[in-house]
Image (cartoon, grey):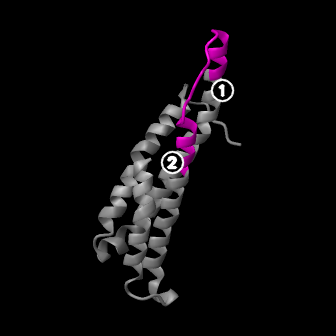
């Protein structure tokens, strides 16, 4: 298990979480914008897929860095006789990562279908159909 607690002496979870909170919606917005036109999809779909994978990776790192922080907060709370409660936050982080990862895989699929449609023998409408299908996990990743 990967456990990152600090980056440059700052809490890693806050830095990585905020990076994911910025990059996942950015990747979704760029995905939606570039898929409006076939020429944009052909030109930028690889860049969008790389951005989506980076965003999902940051969501994973934010999720992983939350565990050491959670343990630290629990220990600190116990020393002063307080019960630390986190509510649904840990589960929300897990869900956010899974949805970001599914979106990233979908963005890779859109790129592959756009790039290799003829080689795979797919119909001309296949890239647009893939785009429409991937909009579902993209919207869900955006909402978490």
Q: CA distance from mark 2 to mark 1?
A: 21 Å
Residues 80 and 112: in front is 80
The residue shown at (35%, 72%) is 41
The residue shown at (61%, 40%) is 64
Q: Is residue 82 magenta?
A: yes
Task: Report how many numbered discs are placed on residues in the image.
Answer: 2
Q: Secondary structure at mark 2?
A: helix
Q: Which residues are magenta?
A: 74-97
Residue 74 position within the rendered picture, expressed as x and y whole percent measured from the top left: 64, 22
Q: Residues within 10 Å of mark 1 (few under 14, many from 20)?
A: few
For the N terminus, the quadrant is: top right
Q: Look at the picture and state if 144 lies above or below 108.
A: above
Q: Residue furthest top?
A: 80
The residue shown at (51%, 48%) is 96
Q: Look at the picture and state if 52 lies above or below 2.
A: below
Q: Is residue 116 left or right of residue 73?
A: left
Residue 68 position within the rendered picture, expressed as x and y whole percent measured from the top left: 64, 30
Q: Are marks 2 and 1 in contact (CB under 8 Å)?
A: no
Residue corresponding to mark 2: 96
The residue shown at (66%, 14%) is 78
Q: Residues within 10 Å of mark 2 (few under 14, many from 20)?
A: many
Q: Is residue 101 left or right of residue 110?
A: right
Residue 54 position within the rendered picture, expressed as x and y whole percent measured from the top left: 49, 53
Residues 138 and 4: in front is 138
Could you say which disc has been placed on residue 71 in the image?
A: 1
Q: Is residue 39 left or right of residue 45?
A: left
């Amino acid at each position: 298990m990967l456990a990152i607690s600090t980056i440059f002496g700052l809490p890693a979870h806050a830095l990585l979480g905020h990076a994911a909170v910025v990059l996942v919606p950015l990747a979704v917005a760029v995905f939606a914008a570039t898929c409006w036109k076939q020429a944009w999809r052909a030109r930028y779909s690889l860049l969008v897929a790389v951005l989506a994978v980076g965003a999902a990776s940051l969501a994973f790192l934010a999720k992983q860095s939350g565990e050491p922080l959670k343990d630290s907060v629990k220990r600190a709370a116990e020393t002063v006789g307080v019960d630390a409660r986190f509510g649904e936050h840990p589960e929300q982080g897990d869900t956010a990562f899974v949805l970001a990862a599914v979106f990233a895989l979908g963005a890779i699929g859109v790129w592959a279908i756009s790039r290799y449609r003829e080689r795979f023998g797919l119909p001309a409408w296949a890239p647009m159909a893939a785009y429409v299908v991937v909009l579902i996990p993209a919207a869900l990743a955006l909402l978490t």
